[in-house]
Amino acid sequence: MEYSLFLFVLVVVILLLRRCRRRTRRNNNHRPPRANLVAFLVNGHRFLDWSTTLLAAAPASTMEVYGPLGSGHRGVTTANPAVVEHIVRGNFHNYVKGDRIKTAFADLLGDDGIFLADGRRWILQRKLASYSFSPRVIRRFAARVVGDQLRRRLLPFFAAAADDGRVFDLQDLLRRFTFDNICSFAFGVDHDSSSAAMEGGGDRRDSAFFAAFDDAVDISFGRILHPTTVVWKVMKLLDVGSERRLRRAIAVVDEYVTTIMADSSEQRRRRCSDEEEEEPDDLLSRFTAAMEEDDGDGDGELGEMFSSPAAKQLFLRDTVKTFAVAAVEDTYYDELKKMHYLHASITETMRLYPPVPMASRVAAAGDVLPDGTAVEAGWFADYSSYAMGRMKSIWGEDCGEFRPERWLNGDAGGGEFVGVDAARYPVFHGGPRSCLGKEMAYVQMKAVADAVIRRFAVEVVAPPRHEMAVTLRMKGGLRVRVSRRRAVSSGMGRLGHVIDGPSAS
Ligand code: HEM
């Protein structure tokens, strides 16, 4: 009896001490509002809007989130620019990708790729990949990849759809187009899934890959939302339910990626035998060279991190999958750069509908955020770009309105685009891990919008609703009908020449 009493007192004392320790670590006894992860799950179908309301009501736009009965994942979610700046830049080294995301996505992407890696492995890949995003490469990407694929594939598809009045899924088409662009830039292969889609359904392998990829990403993402990892780990062990679907989806993705890699190495072999051709600078060639311990910089540290040829090959395959996720001569690029209103419109669209609505990190050590919130080691630290785009405190009373002019410095929309810092607009993240493909993504979006909107009127058949996944997307796609505009080529100057080809000018 005495022994039980002693144990009971001991436990109470330990709990009180732990509580005191936490309190003293908290700055000014600041405690943000708390939300139970279970409530998050209940509101899963409208998660982004629901969490935006909570964050807008929180005094410092930061919330503490805890699992059922205080268990499971625990952390903070914020929409406060000072906190975002602290996480992505100020205390960058303390906020790592960590095991929460890595464990969930490792089966699909491997845990060594640039999106999931931390520390030295990430630094080496970032350095290697950044050569492939140089201004020179982006110029060539605009001219040879985007312009060329617009002319050969996307615009003919739109013309045919306008002529026969068919309704099609614009979201799916643009996704395939982006994928083909990235295959060309990153792996040096001329893949064609977008004009195949034109013939209705297209190549079955492409469609199977896209479906499997979506499924695999969604299930991997769903793993993060489980209150505890035990549930999905047991399902994986038993090979049942969503885990069984994931295993099958990954098999489809891997087979497809292996074909892309074979095509890529064939292209590389051909280029090597043709002495006239310039050095390949696509991303996969750079990574392959690094695996062969000759990355062109004289240091093969990344290659040395993988012990066997098989491990190197697996890493290359994961690199292909990683970049698949992200999924016009020189003057064309300059013309695109001058389109300030279009740039502002796209930026404004992503303010309200950020493609990556939330980003997540894990605190390596305990920390106090700039708003006084205490974070313990191992807690997740998320920020919501979606909520931040809708905060009156950041954008003013008209934060809910689509108003591209807010990004222009002149009157009546005539001025030049002026951006804001990543802390207020973290759509492409910020700091040392900011998006490498930002410039490239703008090139794609502006080129497609410019070429399509000039030529075609686009009518949305059914108003879309967005759904939350790793990336924001429209539920069931975007069903549209298009019709030709009259006299499109007039006034297009050099841009028309690039898209329509020399004969059109
Ligand atoms: C509108 C289009 C895009 C948006 C909004 C976007 C947004 C982002 C965001 C938010 C991150 C940080 C994710 C995180 O670490 O939590 C990121 C990282 C990254 N993005 Fe993008 N991205 C876009 C397009 C692209 C494209 C087209 C590419 C490449 C072809 C690309 C390549 C990358 C890479 C390599 C990283 C990892 C950087 C690192 O960890 O060092 N992105 N992107």
Image (spheres, rainbow, N blue to C red):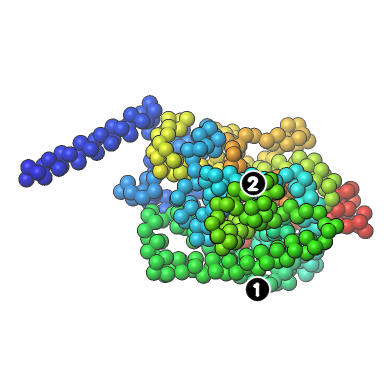
Name the residue furthest left.
1
From the top left corner, tell me how far across and down residue 217 is, in percent. 54, 59
Residue at the far top: name it. 28
Q: Is residue 237 left or right of residue 482?
A: left
Of badges 2 and 1, nearer the viewer stands 2
In this rendering, the answer to whether 11 lies above or below 99 is: above
**Residue depicted at x 45% and y 66%:** 243
Place residue 180 in its image quadrant: bottom right
Marks 2 and 1, how far apart at CA: 42 Å
Of the 4 image quadrants, the one containing the C terminus is bottom right
On-image quarter of the N terminus = top left
Q: Amino acid at mark 1?
A: Arg
Name the amino acid type tagged 2.
Asp
Q: Is residue 373 left or right of residue 203?
A: left
Q: Quadrant of residue 57?
A: top left
Q: Which mark is residue 299?
A: 2
Query: Which residue is at 28% across, 32% downward?
Result: 20
Q: How many marks?
A: 2
Give residue 204's mark: 1
Task: Please give left or right for residue 77 compared with residue 297 in the image.
Answer: left
